Image (tube, helix red, strand yellow):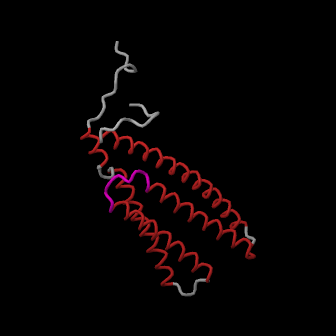
Amino acid sequence: MTDHATMPTPRPSAGELRQRLAAELALPSRIGYTVLLLAGLAVTTVTASLLATEPALPARTRIAFALIAGAGFAWAGFAAWVLARRRVLFASHRVIAAVMGLAFSGLFTTGSLGVWFAGSRQPGALAAAAVGAAMLAAAVLVLRGARRRVREITARKQEIERLLAGQPAAPGQPR
């Protein structure tokens, strides 16, 4: 019986490492960003159409629809940017998406609280603000995780580049 824990793992060659560093965005990611692009465009189209065809909407509703259309357009633009890059982004796209999520959930929470404090005092506005606060907390956690992942990937990328250049491993780094 062979003990797999003691078997050395094969190290990739320098050519394989270079190929991995230059690899394109994986197919599942491309599909996901394509769906995000289409969803963002759909949200923008629907809300912009409502704004254009319903001139009698209250000002508060028009503002909300304009913000929703803007958010949809921003997500579509982000997805288009990622898809246009067509290569590994070393998790920087995760940080950008997390910041966008933080901004949009903060705007939603602020808007919901604004409706509540503006005099409506409707339970729906307060419930929406509570959901927004939960989304805001989740966005903060996602942003922290995304930044941590970028630091890890950057450190690993620098180590691989040092190895490819024939330089010794940094102090404290396993060889």
Kindly give the residue lying farthest to the bottom in the view shown. Answer: 55
Q: Is residue 165 left or right of residue 112?
A: left
- Residue 75 position, x and y percent, is 45, 65
Q: On the image, which quarter does residue 118 sit in?
A: bottom right
Q: Residue 65 or 98: which is nearer the viewer?
A: 98
Query: Where are the magenta residues, as a range?
Result: 84-92
| Residue 104: x %, y % from top left | 56, 65
Instruction: Considering the whole magenta stretch, tell me its main secondary structure.
Output: loop
Give left or right: position of 53 versus 31: right
Is-magenta flag for residue 91?
A: yes
Residue lying at 53% horizontally and 48% vertically, measured from the top left? 145
In the image, 21 versus 171, the foreground residue is 171
Q: Position of residue 139 (x, y in %)?
A: 57, 56
Q: Residue 110's x, y, as percent? A: 65, 68
Q: Would you identify the image quadrant in which residue 17 lies?
A: top left
Quadrant where the N terminus is found in the figure: top left
Residue under the image location 64 percent in, 56 percent down: 134
Q: Is residue 10 left or right of residue 33?
A: left
Question: In this rendering, would 128 be left or right of 172?
Answer: right
Residue 62 drawn above or below residue 9: below
Q: Residue at x 51, y 51 (%)?
A: 147
155 relative to 13, above or below = below
Residue 127 counted in the magenta span: no
Residue 32 sits above or below residue 159 on the image: below
Quadrant for the C terminus, please: top left
* Residue located at (47% from left, 33% from top): 172
